[in-house]
Image: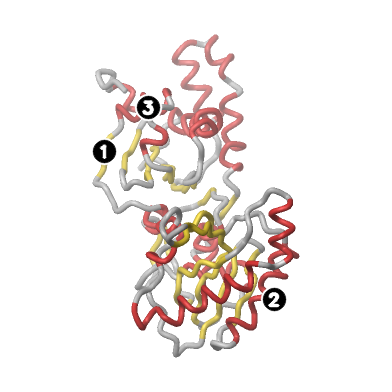
Amino acid sequence: MSAAVNVLLPSRDKLRYVPAFAAWLARATTLPAALPGYLVATAEQFHWPSGPLPAAALIRQSVAGDAGDALWLSADPAWVQPELNGARLLACGNLGLRPEESMALVTALAETFEAEGMKLLVGDSQHWQLRLPKYVDVPSFPEPEEALGADLFEQLPKGEEGRRWRALINEAQVVLHNHPVNAARVARGLPPVNSVWLWGAGALPDWVECGLGRIYSDDLLAWALGHRANVDVQPRSAFVDSSAGTASVGAASAANGVRGKVAIAAKAAPTEVAYSLLDLQDIQPAEFEQVWWPAIETRLEAGTDIRLAFADGQRMVVRKSHRLRFWRKA
């Protein structure tokens, strides 16, 4: 069986106007669609005992090694924009917090959560976790990608079950509103951290399995899953770096004709595990066209299957042999 790279991408509409990519897509094989969402596409590559993906516990174990058997909930720093009739979640995690800023904000919030028997901890400076008492019933919270851009209050748990959690988030917002860290961030032209977003509840699973040999990602959850599954994880820039050798043989291969090109490409193709995951879920079209698609196409030309998982749920596979489907046009 040939090697394969599973690529996580934004929605197909966002990338369909990248010409070289569109030409291959027209010749690709369409697979059964899945539910939309980055976490859905990520979770397709992994297996764990049961239930929803316990993102908070996995991240906590990866960054701090102390998840144990506790119940965890992600409480990621968030930016909320007030509006006339509510508020909108504009960002969650990855807000460029400095470590000292993150620690200052978490320290300020500590009393709010401790009053409910919960402990707020810094995982890394961009991601925080709540350690919960085991008796706490945690309602369903939308994942960040689902809640981003939506009305904040429509996303929060409803009814009596959600009252406690709505109150906690409101109290956190009051504490954060006038914090000196946020005043300094706004003065530097950065968004304030004026809320937290709760999601990814659960305990650390006994095991996580996958068929991957390597993961290329800059996302903390992907790293956490890889660590739990005992898979090699690297920054996604390593994927481009490992493809550079093949790109440099272009001039020599042209001088040798088609047969020489195939031989040189095969010889220069990067050493790769049988199955890998490349996480490009947040990539912009210009960068994809200039940097990432050439690196992916290098693998494709060397005979690696490219399996595409778009955030809108579309699934496709592209193979070197698909170049023979010349009648299909973008």
Q: Which amino acid type is shown beneath numbered disc 3?
A: Ala
> What is the total number of numbered labels drawn onto the structure image?
3
Q: Nearer the viewer, residue 268 or 20?
A: 20
Which is in the foreground here, disc 1 or disc 2?
A: 2
Q: Nearer the viewer, residue 282 or 320?
A: 282
Which is in the foreground here, disc 3 or disc 1?
A: 3
Tell me which corner region of the image, top left, top right, bottom left or bottom right, holds residue 14. top left
Secondary element at tag 1: strand
Which is in the foreground here, disc 3 or disc 2?
A: 2
Which quarter of the figure is the C terminus placed in? top left
Q: Earlier in the sequence, mark 1 or mark 2?
A: 1
From the image, tell me which residue sits under label 1. 30
From the image, tell me which residue sits under label 2. 107
Tell me which corner region of the image, top left, top right, bottom left or bottom right, holds residue 64. bottom right
What is the crowding at mark 1: few (fewer than 14 residues within 10 Å), some, or many (at least 20)?
A: some
- Image coordinates of residue 52 in percent, x first then y, are 37, 69
Q: Is residue 133 visible?
A: yes
Secondary element at tag 3: helix
- Measure the C-alpha gap from mark 3 to mark 2: 49 Å
What is the crowding at mark 2: few (fewer than 14 residues within 10 Å), some, or many (at least 20)?
A: some
Q: Nearer the viewer, residue 330 or 299?
A: 330
Q: Nearer the viewer, residue 297 or 169?
A: 169
From the image, tell me which residue sits under label 3. 22
Q: Which amino acid type is shown beneath numbered disc 1?
A: Thr
Secondary element at tag 2: helix
Which quarter of the figure is the N terminus placed in? top left
- Image coordinates of residue 92 in percent, x first then y, are 53, 59
